[in-house]
Amino acid sequence: MQPFTLEQGRGITDTIARGRAPGADYIAGGTDLMQLLKDDVRRPSALIDLEGLDLGGILVTAQGLRLGAMARMGEVADHPAVLRDYPVISEALLASAAPQIRNLGTIGGNLLQRTRCTYFRDTASPCNKRAPGTGCAAIEGNHRTHAIFGGSRHCIATHASDLAVALAALDATVHLHGPNGERDLKVTELHLVPSDHPDIETMLHPGELILAVTVPAGAWTRRSHYLKVRDRASFEFALTSAAVALDIQGGTIRAARVAAGGVGTKPWRLPAVEQALVGAPATADTWARAGQLSTAEASPLTENRFKVRLLQNTVACALEQAGGQT
């Protein structure tokens, strides 16, 4: 770990100015960043501490849910209104990490965590995301856990956040503040597929901060579920996951939201699956057909081909658990 200075801004404007400086990086809970510093993957000259900013809080209204960027994962997961009205968010957070990490990790930091690709985190390996132009070791190497959606010839690393998958399914919006003021982005627009530039991972401008995330209220949020499939029960990232939310009236699906994790280079929304569900009966056959549709655009490689069938089953099971079987 190389030496760095630890700074704290005097309010939002000063913090952003410090965050724009060459070599600067923000630190919130630090649960991901500290490991990257120790592994020499990131080498900032200055860390800008966000703890002094008033960016916490959980607000529930008739219009929806607002999560401050500095709200802790644990407090959001355990919040009574989140558990009752947005269970997919609580379930995604509980599946993300151990309690100790959830008590430190923040909502904004979780959305911006870096990939768990072993080649990205091993500085001895070529990696276009960490060192542009060096190549992607995973494509010809061990890619069992890598993406089947959104990859390119330069990168096939999966996005790691469980929470981002749940928020993508719920049409959440990220509220940002940067040098040019405030702006909003859909969670589905925040992250970028690698294309020719895997090192550019988000739509954030230099120095831009996440202020909060909002989730609109809807009939589907209460009937929602997050299902995560992994190699072991704890301290493991998703092989596949599915976040689903359904509005069912009289046994018929009126609205559906479906997103997948562990399979894409960003949280992967599945609009074709959603469209097929609307108007269909809430039955086991419907869930199975939706699962089959979930991988229509998948592009697996040799070692991760198993994820196609696994995702189909994950989506079908998540829908059945959220919607029931009739």
Image (tube, helix red, strand yellow):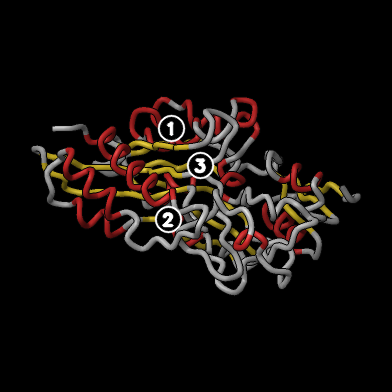
From the viewer's perspective, is residue 153 above or below residue 55?
Answer: below
| Residue 150 x/y as whole percent | 48, 63
The residue labelled by disc 1 is 91
The residue labelled by disc 2 is 268
Q: Residue furthest right?
A: 3
Badge 3 marks a residue whose secondary structure is loop
| Residue 77 x/y as whole percent | 48, 30
Q: Residues within 10 Å of mark 2 (few under 14, many from 20)?
A: many
Q: Residues within 10 Å of mark 1 (few under 14, many from 20)?
A: many
Q: Amino acid at mark 3?
A: Ala
Depth check, front residue: 205 or 9 = 205
Q: Amino acid at mark 2?
A: Trp
Badge 1 marks a residue whose secondary structure is helix
Q: Name the mark on residue 238.
A: 3
Depth check, front residue: 59 or 116 = 116
Q: Do the residues under discs 2 and 1 have CB atoms within 8 angstroms?
A: no
Residue 14, by quadrant, is: bottom right
Badge 2 marks a residue whose secondary structure is strand
Q: Which circle's residue, 2 or 3, is located before the other in the chain?
A: 3
| Residue 156 x/y as whole percent | 56, 61
| In this view, the mark in front (2 or 1) | 2
Image-based side of 269 in relation to 110, left or right: left
Residue found at x 51% / y 41%: 238
From the viewer's perspective, is residue 270 above or below residue 164?
Answer: below
Q: Is residue 51 among what the camera can see?
A: yes
